[in-house]
Image (cartoon, coloured by chain):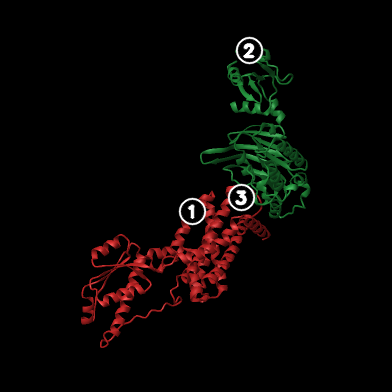
């Protein structure tokens, strides 16, 4: 055990001496949390709206004004020909066309029903979906309003949908993103660092000197993993502080649980890094291999697209994505206030995962050349 | 206790289709400096790796200090010191931190074995807070030797310690090795430099993974059989090509500022080592001088030469 301590001590000496390492460990989580949380924002604002008003009635103008007042849309132009509006959409001047048919007001007053057409540019499906969602909401709200004020004798629409967004009542994307991004960054950095650190010993040749010492396999491995294990806790502390100070993200759950989970989760990523290092001969190889896996892990972890909307096979594949568990955990505990009982399945899955990955890493590590 | 420190018995190792070491056997006695001499790619490093338990041989057995290199590798690693050919210490740690680290992992302290490394370490002391990566070649080598010695090994393996080091540092280094040998440490050293070979107690000449000869450096040079001359003129390149055509079987190669000419045939080395006999009886320094002058060489000088390890090596390579 003393040998492990010496190895850890040596590792920290090297980490603190590396001018690049310490800033990377501390600045990267801060910058990424701030940058990505602001930038990776799914709220769509300032959609450019083209209006085709064939009716030109007070009602149609009011409807258009409602769109403009919503904050989501900016009226780009009002034209009287669908062709011109279509051309604008095609040239990307507008994101959405609102077409009001002739006799819109007359039909509405006479028959209690009017029709409008909304056309969205769905090149960016997410944006289009949101735009149509917003637009429908505005139209619906408008018609309800009309129904209650203009036609007093008519009963309001029978079914009304009331929204309430639990755990993130204001649908603040930052609240949603920060815990996930924290999980992602910690996974990324410790996996990379472990893989590169071990391969570096091989590339520089120091491993040859180490291998003729009586250091045993488990001591070497523990000596390599422990420093980054501890660093993951530091990064978590820094990241949570930034989340709280800058974004005021809710921390409903027990923070001790977050740290305890980090201690179990970190070995997963450390183990993966270690496993990669066993098969890589140079830092370059390790870097590319780690990047290949991490890119998949990150894009599929549910941070950017919900796991639930992935195809069945992808969801199954995601069972081996450790980052998914971490992101899920962070959101559940921080936003929803989940307790250990709620996340224990996740917890034990990750525990098992860590055991398997590290077992494989130890098994494939060779002290002889 | 056996007087043999290293026993290698028909060791073979191949990397893919390349046979790096072929059926190599040799013994190293306790407390001797044994040199593995050979050009790059002769299999020296592979042998070192097998003997230091880093590499498993394909065939053959070896023991170091009575311990089998395959079976008892754990115990073995406590008893050997290895200095790889490439500088393998932590460049970003200081001199002292490196030494401390290796002392620690061997479960010892610098103080405990300071006596052994004192002579070397005093030279390093002024730089003890300098990072190992910022040391000169000679200093790096001394540090590496300190780190390999810090646990008081019984057998020391030095893979090409002279490479990349200036001649003065190399000389000092060899003096240190002699002192270490005197404190009963067996030293196996490899080198591509023939001048270092003459500083060993015994040497094995290695070529393409095979041992060509094992003897003391004197024994090896004494076994040299051919009449040997050293010659020079103003036009060395032409001199070498001309001498190669002097008589059948003549070898000529550059040797410092001279060219060495080895003639076919046997020289009786016992009495007067350089006097040509039998086949080459007619050839002498005078005849060579005449021959060269007839070819139009200026400032010709021809001497009888004594064979060095390098001459022996070149001869063996030709066989």
State the mark number for residue A185: none
Q: Nearer the viewer, residue A236 or B271?
A: A236
- Expressed as whole percent of the image width and height from the top left, the position of residue B198 reads 71, 32
Above or below, comparing residue A270 to residue A331 in the picture: above
Residues marked 3 and 1, same chain: yes
Q: Tell us which disc is closer to us: 3 or 1.
A: 1
Q: Is residue A263 visible?
A: no
In three-dimensional space, the C-alpha distance between marks 3 and 1, rounded to whole angstroms, equals 21 Å
Looking at the rendered image, the disc whose residue lies closer to the viewer, 2 or 3, is 2
**Furthest residue to the bottom?**
A153
Pointers 2 and 3 in contact (C-beta within 8 Å): no
Instruction: Report the Cα–Cα distance between label 2 and label 3.
Output: 59 Å
Which chain is the one coloured green?
B
Residue annotated with mark 1: A289
From the viewer's side, name the closer residue of B269 and A353: A353
Residue A246 x/y as whole percent: 53, 70
Q: Which mark is residue A207?
A: 3
Q: Which residue is mark 2?
A: B293
Q: What kind of element bears circle 1?
A: helix
Output the letter for the chain in red: A
Q: Nearer the viewer, residue A135 or B232?
A: A135
Which quarter shows the N terminus of chain A? bottom right
Label 1 environment density (alpha carbons within 10 Å; few <14, some 14–19, many ≥20): some
Tag 2 and tag 3 share a subunit = no
Which percent across, then down, holds residue A184?
A: 50, 64
- At label 3, counting other C-alpha atoms closer than 10 Å, the crowd grade (few under 14, some 14-19, many 20 or more) is many
Q: How many numbered marks are there? A: 3
Mark 2 on the same chain as mark 1: no
Chain ID for label 1? A
Residue B293 seen anywhere in this rendered image of the structure: yes
Q: Nearer the viewer, residue B31 or A41?
A: A41
């Amino acid at each position: 055990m003393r040998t492990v301590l010496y190895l850890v001590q040596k590792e920290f000496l090297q980490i603190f001496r590396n001018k690049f390492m310490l800033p990377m460990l501390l600045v990267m989580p801060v910058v990424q949390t701030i940058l990505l949380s602001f930038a990776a924002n799914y709220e769509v604002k300032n959609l450019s709206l083209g209006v085709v008003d064939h009716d030109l009635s007070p009602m149609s103008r009011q409807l258009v004004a409602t769109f403009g007042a919503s904050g989501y849309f900016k009226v780009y132009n009002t034209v009287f020909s669908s062709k011109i509006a279509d051309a604008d959409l095609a040239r990307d001047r507008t994101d959405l066309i609102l077409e009001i048919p002739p006799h819109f007001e007359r039909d509405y007053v006479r028959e209690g029903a009017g029709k409008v057409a909304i056309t969205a540019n769905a090149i960016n499906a997410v944006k289009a979906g949101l735009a149509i969602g917003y637009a429908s909401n505005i139209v619906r709200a408008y018609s309800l309003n009309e129904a209650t004020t203009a036609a007093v004798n008519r009963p309001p629409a029978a079914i009304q949908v009331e929204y309430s967004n639990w755990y993130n009542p204001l649908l603040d994307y930052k609240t949603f993103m920060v815990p996930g991004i924290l999980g992602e960054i910690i996974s990324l950095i410790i996996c990379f660092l472990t893989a590169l650190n071990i391969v570096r010993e091989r590339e520089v040749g120091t491993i040859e000197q180490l291998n003729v010492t009586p250091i045993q396999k488990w001591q070497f491995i523990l000596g390599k993993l422990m420093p980054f294990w501890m660093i993951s806790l530091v990064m978590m502390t820094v990241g949570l502080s930034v989340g709280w100070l800058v974004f005021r993200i809710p921390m409903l759950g027990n923070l001790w649980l977050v740290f305890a989970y980090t201690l179990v989760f970190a070995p997963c990523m450390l183990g993966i890094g270690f496993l990669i290092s066993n098969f890589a001969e140079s830092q370059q190889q390790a870097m590319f291999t780690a990047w290949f896996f991490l890119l998949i892990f990150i894009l599929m972890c549910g941070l950017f697209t919900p796991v639930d909307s992935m195809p069945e096979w992808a969801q199954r594949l995601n069972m081996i994505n450790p980052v998914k568990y971490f992101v899920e955990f962070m959101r559940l505990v921080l936003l929803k206030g989940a307790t250990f009982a709620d996340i224990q399945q996740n917890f034990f899955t990750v525990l098992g995962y860590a055991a398997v990955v590290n077992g494989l890493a130890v098994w494939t590590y060779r002290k002889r050349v | 206790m056996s007087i043999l420190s290293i026993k290698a018995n028909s060791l073979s190792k191949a990397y893919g289709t390349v046979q790096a070491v072929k059926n190599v056997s040799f013994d190293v006695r306790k407390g001797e400096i044994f040199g593995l001499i050979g050009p790059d790619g002769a299999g020296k490093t592979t042998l070192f790796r097998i003997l230091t338990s880093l590499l498993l041989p394909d065939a053959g057995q070896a023991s170091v200090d009575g311990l089998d290199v395959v079976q008892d590798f754990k115990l073995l690693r406590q008893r050997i010191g290895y200095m790889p050919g490439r500088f393998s210490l932590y460049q970003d740690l200081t001199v002292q931190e490196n030494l401390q680290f290796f002392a620690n992992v061997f479960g010892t302290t610098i103080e405990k074995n300071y006596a052994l490394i004192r002579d070397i370490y005093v030279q390093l002391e002024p730089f003890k807070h300098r990072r190992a990566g910022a040391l000169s070649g000679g200093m790096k080598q001394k540090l590496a030797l300190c780190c390999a010695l810090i646990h008081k090994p019984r057998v020391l393996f030095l893979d090409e310690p002279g490479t990349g080091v200036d001649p003065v540092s190399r000389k000092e280094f060899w003096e240190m090795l002699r002192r270490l040998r005197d404190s009963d440490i067996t030293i196996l050293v490899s080198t591509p430099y023939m001048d270092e070979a003459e500083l060993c107690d015994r040497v094995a000449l290695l070529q393409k993974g095979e041992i060509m000869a094992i003897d003391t450096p004197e024994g090896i040079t004494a076994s040299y059989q051919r009449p040997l001359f050293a010659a020079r003129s103003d036009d060395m390149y032409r001199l070498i090509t001309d001498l190669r055509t002097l008589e059948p079987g003549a070898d000529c190669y550059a040797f410092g500022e001279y060219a060495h000419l080895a003639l076919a045939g046997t020289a009786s080395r016992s009495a007067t080592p350089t006097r040509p006999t039998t086949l080459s009886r007619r050839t002498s320094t005078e005849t060579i001088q005449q021959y060269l002058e007839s070819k139009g060489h200026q400032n010709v000088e021809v001497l009888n030469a004594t064979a060095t390890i390098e001459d022996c090596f070149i001869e063996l390579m030709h066989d």
